Image (tube, rainbow, N blue to C red):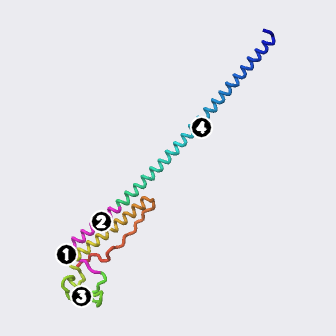
Amino acid sequence: MTGKSWAALAAALVLAGATGLAYRQGASSRDGEVAQLNAVRANLEQAYANLALDAQKRINAEQTARQQRVAAADQRATQEVEDAKRRYETDLAAVRGGTVGVRLNGADCTATGSNAVPTAPAGAGVADAASGGLPESVAQDVLGLRAAIEHDAAQIAGLQGYIRAITGEPVTRQPAPDPVASAPAAQ
């Protein structure tokens, strides 16, 4: 081989070595970029997983709070129904026992006209006209109607509380008006 050939061969080897080195450095650089991109992707996946976990925790907390509001509204409504039933049973026992009677509000024993109570017993219907009291059977019917109205009012209030609990509105309780203006009165 001549000197030129050796020089060309040496130049080719140097060039090949430089190309190989550049290729390895490029590959090494690409490997670094790929590793960096994989790390970024892993960080993003972790961030999305954390966001999803936080969102699920908020959903679970809201659902638990809603269930607690519904349970509280149900408990209040159930208690109101039970209280109304107890009042009815107590009033009915008092009427049956003769310790309490039911009076008509608006009836005036001294008035004349449509608001007047007859002064003499008028047969069936008015047991004691002077007192404005009702016969026991009618009083029991009146108390039964009153109990039914109170029961229905408590159920409606319970349903409204349930709706408020579901929608997240604050549950404000307003005392229900007395469904029957007349209450049992002592005889």
Q: Quadrant of the N terminus?
A: top right
What residue is shown with label 2?
Answer: 83
Q: Which residues are magenta?
A: 76-104
First reached walking from the N terminus: tag 1 or tag 3? 1
Alpha carbons under labels 1 and 3: distance apart:
22 Å
Q: Main secondary structure of the magenta part?
A: helix
Q: Residue at x 54, y 43 (%)?
A: 48
Q: Position of residue 25 (x, y in %)?
A: 68, 26
Q: Amino acid at mark 2?
A: Asp
Q: Amino acid at mark 4?
A: Val
Please tell me how crowded label 4 is: few (under 14), some (14-19), or many (20+) other residues with Cα within 10 Å.
Answer: few
* Residue 104 vertical position relative to residue 86 in the rendered view, above or below: below
Q: Secondary structure at mark 3?
A: loop
Q: Secondary structure at mark 4?
A: helix
Q: Amino acid at mark 3?
A: Pro
What residue is shown with label 3?
Answer: 118
Question: In this rendering, would 17 be left or right of 59?
Answer: right
Q: Secondary structure at mark 2?
A: helix
What residue is shown with label 1?
Answer: 98
Which label sits in the foreground, 1 or 4?
4
First reached walking from the N terminus: tag 3 or tag 4? 4
Residue 89 lies in magenta, yes or no?
A: yes
Q: Secondary structure at mark 1?
A: loop
Name the foreground residue: 148 vs 110. Answer: 148
Alpha carbons under labels 2 and 4: distance apart:
64 Å
What residue is shown with label 4?
Answer: 40
Tag 1 and tag 4, C-beta contact below 8 Å: no
Q: Residue at x 22, y 85 (%)?
A: 129
Residue 10, label in figure: none
Name the foreground residue: 31 vs 9. Answer: 9
